[in-house]
Amino acid sequence: MNWYYGAMLIVANWKAYVETREEAKKLFALAKRLVVAVRRVKIVLAPSAAHLGLLAPGNRSKVMFASQDMSDTTVSAATGEVTGGTLHNLGVDYVILGHSERRARGESDALIAEKVRRALVNGLTPILCVGERARDEDAQYLILLKQQITSVFSVLAPKERLEVVVAYEPVWAIGKHAGDAPSPQDIGEMVLYIRKVLSEFLPGKSAAKATVLYGGSVEAGNIRAIAGGSGVDGFLVGHASADASQFTALVKALI
């Protein structure tokens, strides 16, 4: 996608940075203003589960919502779990799955694949996070990346595969500064590789049209260069999305 002609998808993953309802409401109000002011962006907020229940119901703005995770269960005796059906009924559109922080807690490829499947059944768009913890000279990290994608797409029906958003987040670049992020050229090479893997599961030219996001040390200082030089369709933003001034600068950098 040439971002000068297509809107960038910005997924704001608040993680556990936002604790008060007042702060959550202020960030939501800011997002509503930004999505109107900057026409080249689509904004998806991913608050905590508690704040999803506060903000998403009755939402009629252009801002959309994502859950930071969801259960692999359905209606059952599963204390503490949030099901896909619950999220759908709240008005949630997307769900982030396979995030590196969840994988670090022990989530397997099989569990993530099941969550993706259940998200699709419940009308949610999965944002599948993939990425290596480190680079090695033998490029084994590419094999890992392919495995993370294949484990999910191989169990989905052909039509379901078209609905999945892929977010590339190299773990070694997360939570750092813009100077530590991969170059736009490097990100572009990984995007091409991801599309090559996707081409094994998507028909015709569908892989070229699949939505691929980037996440990892995205700031106002580098987002424009990455958007224009890597072929990404948007960004998965962490800590900067929970800071009003940083998020404003980041989004407006795409004007």
Image: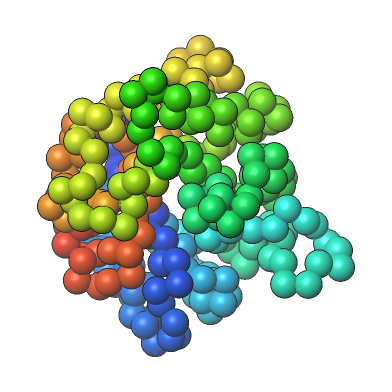
On screen, residue 199 above or below 84:
above
Question: Which residue appears farthest toward the front when viewing the image?
Answer: 137
Residue 155 falls left or right of residue 172 = right
Question: Which residue appears farthest toward the right when viewing the image?
Answer: 77
Q: Nearer the viewer, residue 64 or 132?
A: 132
Residue at the location (15% across, 40% down)? 225
Residue at the location (27% across, 71% down)? 243
Q: Which of 213 and 120 is in front in this view?
A: 213
Residue at the location (34% across, 74% down)? 27
Q: Nearer the viewer, residue 35 or 73?
A: 73
The quarter in which the N terminus is drawn is: top left
Residue at the location (49% across, 43% down)? 129
Question: Which residue appears farthest toward the top when viewing the image?
Answer: 204
Residue 221 falls left or right of residue 12 = left
Colouring of the image: rainbow
Whether residue 104 is visible = yes
Residue 188 falls left or right of residue 126 = left
Query: Picture coordinates of residue 213 (x, y %)?
Result: 38, 41
Query: Picture coordinates of residue 196 (x, y %)?
Result: 44, 18
Query: Picture coordinates of residue 77 (x, y %)?
Result: 86, 68
Query: Picture coordinates of residue 24 (x, y %)?
Result: 40, 78
Q: Nearer the viewer, residue 241 or 163?
A: 241
On screen, residue 56 above or below 142:
below
Q: In which quarter of the image is residue 6?
A: top left
Residue 250 falls left or right of residue 100 = left
